[in-house]
Amino acid sequence: MEWTGDTAAGDWLRQDIDQPWRGTMNDIVPRGFEGYARVFHRSTRERPVGRPWPAEPYERHRAEWDAVMHGDIDVEPARWADAAAAFGTTMHAGAQWNRLVRGDFRARGVEPLDGDGWRYSEPREGCLDPESVAALAAVAAEYTTTPDDAYVAVWEGWGGLVGSFGPAPTAALAVSEPQLADNEMEWVSLEEHHRRMLGFAVTDPFNNVFRKPVWRPGRLSDEISRAVMDGARLDLPGRPHVLFRARLDELATPEWATRVPWADQTPEWTASPSWIWPSDHAFAIASEIDWDSTIVAGSNAFVRAVCAHPGLEALPIREGTMLTWDSDDLNR
């Protein structure tokens, strides 16, 4: 897989995308394809072994929560259909997660809890997991005449992807638990850990007012980063992307997440491609960064193959379907 500055290769995607955005799937993928499918990003569910979850809020039940978090917890993958069955809702192509699990749990700072004691995590927005990307790529290679001549675009805005000039690192580590101090003998609070990190990671604007910004490398090479900064990016409505030439078989196993030029040190957190398409334009695969599902456009045969794949949770979807957070009328 190689970076390319020939961003004209993606111009065709703009031709039939809804502009301005209307809240439909065609804000993201072009109209005019024979068929479409929606691939639902994975969730997980977990529950303590041999005991129920403690009551909320955490501050009032700290001891019970500490006991649970230091005990055994079962964790397993969960499909959207599993959540619908658990909460008594209807799984369908236009389903929205918050409606499927009966409530806006995010606003209350908790995760959905079903009658069997399972807590469900929200599907990851903007990214497909490595196994699902591999499954899609393997299927897609059978429905194009140019599997060895394809394009992959990655949203430029992922943290630490592209290098830049500035006073602070381009990527930072977020933690939610107390950390061992430097001597590994003292536990420090999250606030203290954050304070110490700022002490060496960020310049002091009051005592270093004349300090010039320095170059902070990203995960992509400095050559690519500087070219992107100079304008070699694929601009699609509302989203700038870095573009690569690729073969589909480079994505057809989960190990792609360790080999792509933008790979993260933790493979499961490597950003999935925002766009995949072959040079013959037989299909387009798009993962919008604010959506918890990926849209596939192509032939009816391709759509059927995607929906039939055992490693994917996907349903056919009609062109023009609304996909806003409140568009799930079946589960209102």
Image: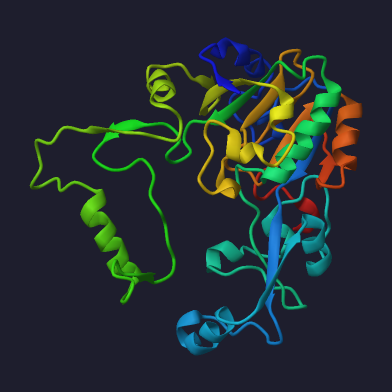
- The answer to whether residue 234 is above or below residue 238 is above
The answer to which image quadrant residue 225 occupies is: top left
Q: Is residue 101 left or right of residue 226?
A: right
Q: Which of 287/107 is in front?
A: 287
Q: Quadrant of the C terminus?
A: bottom right
The residue located at (66%, 76%) in the rendering is 73
The residue located at (71%, 52%) in the rendering is 42
Q: Is residue 171 left or right of residue 137?
A: left
The answer to which image quadrant residue 222 occupies is: top left
Q: Is there any visible trace of residue 43 in the rendered image?
A: yes
What is the image's colouring?
rainbow
Image spot of residue 181 (x, y percent):
31, 69
The residue located at (82%, 19%) in the rendering is 144
- The answer to whether residue 215 is above or below residue 203 is above
The answer to which image quadrant residue 228 occupies is: top left
Q: Which of 25/227 is in front?
A: 227
Q: How many marks?
A: 0
Image spot of residue 286 (x, y percent):
67, 32
Q: Quadrant of the N terminus?
A: top right
The residue located at (26%, 50%) in the rendering is 201
Q: Is residue 247 left or right of residue 55?
A: right
- The answer to whether residue 48 is above or below residue 106 is below
Image spot of residue 313 (x, y percent):
81, 48
Q: Is there any visible trace of residue 321 in the rendered image?
A: no
